[in-house]
Amino acid sequence: MRLTGYRAHMSFLERVNDLPVLGLGMSTEYGAGDSKGALDLLAHKREHPQFARFLELGIETVKGIDTHAEAWLSTGSPTTYHFLDVNLDEKEDFDAIWLAQVRALVRKIKPAWMCGDAGLWHFGRRERGHMLLLPPILTDESASALADGIVALREATGLEVLPENPPGHVFLGDLHLLDFFARVCERADTGMLLDCAHLAIYQRTMGYEPTTGIADFPTDRIIETHIAGGTEKSLNGFHWVEDDHTVDVLPDTWQVLETIAPRVPNLKAAVFECERNPAAYCIPGFKRIQETLSDHPVVQ
């Protein structure tokens, strides 16, 4: 959906009406479909179309898309573009080569919008093909830099760019994560992809209740949501949750989804991230998401 003509002067909460309702879908990234027992995207779409209304493509431009994504695209089914290789708060990342590759991929996959974890995909100089994901520094200055990057990518691609709250085991800065992203959304005049599992991990890491801060967050900015399983781990007295996209969704994550469900009037898409699991194991998660959002058009 291109930001051209009069739409370029509209606020996001006006532009959001032009975004399509994608529904309940799946995610993948390069090579995920080759994992043993991985979700078969097209078979899942044939057998459970209500759970496979679109595909979110995790993309590193240096890799592009794999044969599984190509097969999906050949059906003409909807997609979104989930970047895995740019620090939005670093102007140097928006180099001509990367932007040319992004634009070429956008022309090929025709995504409804772009989105991605708004953290640090690299530390220091970017090395192509090297994935490192750290949370952003949760300060006001960092929020402004991140907002600037979102605006720059939106203008460069003509697509809405929805920042996602990343996972992490250590968070730096003086802002609560939801306060941080509220500032980002306001300054970039954008919507957001709220990852329920990532938020639950942050809340537990910081010693908060799972839903702390949701009541004060502008939930009308939430356009997409992710749900995924995680594994509780412990070593030498340190306890954490590994964001490993299993089908075992933690109670904290479900609590976040249940809390936001009646508060997201502009929700257009929901994804169950279970791409490396057999379809039979994924179905209960899809069904629970559908049930939790049963009063929302996104699952109608």
Image (spheres, rainbow, N blue to C red):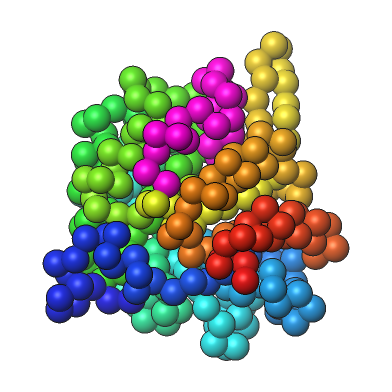
| Quarter residue 255 falls in | top right
Residue at (39, 38) in percent of width and height: 217
Left or right: residue 251 compared with residue 205: right
Decide if residue 257 is in sight here. yes
Q: Main secondary structure of the magenta part?
A: helix
Residue 206: within the magenta? yes
Name the spot of residue 180 as percent of width and height, x first.
34, 34
Name the spot of residue 61 as percent of width and height, x first.
41, 65
Residue at (21, 60) in percent of width and height: 11
Name the spot of residue 126 as percent of width and height, x first.
34, 47
The residue range painted magenta reads: 196-219
Decide if residue 64 is in sight here. no
User: Which is more toward the observer, 23 or 292?
Assistant: 292
Q: Is residue 257 above or below residue 41?
A: above
Q: Residue furthest right?
A: 280
Residue 169: within the magenta? no
Residue at (43, 60) in percent of width and height: 266
Left or right: residue 261 compared with residue 246: left
Quadrant holding the C terminus: bottom right
Residue at (72, 37) in percent of width and height: 250
Q: Is residue 250 above or below residue 43?
A: above
Name the spot of residue 198 as percent of width and height, x first.
55, 39
User: Which is more toward the observer, 262 or 232?
Assistant: 262
Quadrant holding the N terminus: bottom left
